[in-house]
Image (cartoon, grey):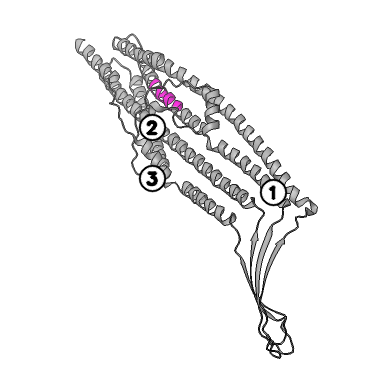
Amino acid sequence: MKSKSFFFVVILLLIFNNNPAQENHSSLNSLINKAIELNPKLKMLEAKKNSSEKRVSINSNLPDPNLTLGIMSLPTNTFSFTQEAMTAKVIGLSQAVPFPGKLNKTAEVFNKDVEITKEELNDSRNEIINNVKQAYYDLNYIREALKISGRSKENLERIVSVVRTKYMVSEATQQNLIQADLELSKISDKIAELKGSERTNVSILNSYVLQDPETPIETEEISELDSTDLNIDNLINTAKQNRPFLKGIQLKKNKSLIMENLAEYEFYPNFNFTVQYSQRDRIAETNMPLNDFISFLVGLNIPINYGGKKSAKIEESQIMQRMYDDEYDNAIQLLIKSFSEGLSKLKELKERERLNRDGLLPQAKLLLKSAMANYQVGKTDFINVLDAQNKVYEAETNLYKIKIQYYKELAKLEFLCGHSELQKSNQ
């Protein structure tokens, strides 16, 4: 009897002290940095920004001057340059000049395009960071679930060994033995499923860094939930200050305002300055020399608002400003909804983590100890031992899953408010 008691004590010690040492890798930040560096969409947007910068100088400088070469008043009977005093060889240079201030406003419009593209680039960068974090946390959970499943399988194997021993001495039924083997097969199937999910998530992460799908990726232990105190007002203010998407909407509105000012220049004339030099030869009959001429001309267009086409540009810009105001308000409304849901979820997960850590998991372990002790002396059925073991497995898995869900939700809030320091404790 003493030897049996010692055997059960050894099993209990193995069950409740089989906790692996925590790993400490900093692979998440390196994955994020590499994904940002290699992402084709970001490279595309960077090229788009660079091309927008070039369009500023293309559209905000004077057009090329025009060179004019010609012959004036050439007689058709002789085609002689020395027959008529009116005949001259002409060279001219003209330059179109917009109304003063128009080019500066045009430059401001195209500079806004550069800023808008920059914010689009920043928002896409934040989106990639969020995507990498979500996939990373999923992989982290799967690997921890594999560890927990592996420990549970080892515990079940020890329990099966005990049942076989008891069965050999007629202290356990064949049904107990079959039930134990069934539970062992179920956990083995779960491990196989998790390994498949692990391979899938590894390939997803590798796709973000343009690596071979089977390239190994390390994951780090998730720390305890932090004590970050978030509220919806702070998140909204942070989003207004940092979210590139919201900044982009404001920049688009500012661009429309500048375009309205630019459209007002349509009611002012543009100019064309011309200088012309006319060279004349001596008259052949009289041998009289003729003076050359130089001419200065100023032309301008007459800004007539045919069909209201010029005033329509102003009205269009004003409509666009109101549209961007509505788009901004709609974005804030959606953010308030998302922040409310996210904060409620974080509060729920924190409470569930506390209940699982301080209540369900310790209680499940005590239940397993009690079930094993009672089974040893024949006071409980073997099915209660298996049920208690399953409860420990579920409690351990759920506790880690809650932590992962918490940090995934926090990463989502970081993306929505455009700020990456909501979870400093886990970086």
Q: Which residue is mark 2?
A: 140
Nearer-the-camera pick, 318 or 48 = 318
Image quarter of residue 17: top left
In the image, residue 112 above or below residue 240: below
Q: Earlier in the sequence, mark 1 or mark 3?
A: 3
Which of pointers 3 and 2 lies earlier in the amino acid sequence? 2
Q: Amino acid at mark 1?
A: Ala
Magenta stretch bounds: 395-406
Marks 3/2 in contact by CB < 8 Å: the verdict is no
Circle 1 residues within 10 Å: few <14, some 14–19, many ≥20 = many
Is residue 307 found inside the magenta-colored segment of the image? no
Question: Residue 206: x percent and y percent?
Answer: 39, 43
- Binning the other alpha carbons within 10 Å of mark 2 as few (below 14), some (14 to 19) or many (20 upward) gives many
Residue occupying image coordinates x 68% and y 89%: 287
Tell me if residue 105 can be seen: yes
Give the quarter of the figure containing the N terminus: top left
Tell me how far mark 1 sits from mark 3, CA to CA.
54 Å
Residue 202 visible here: no
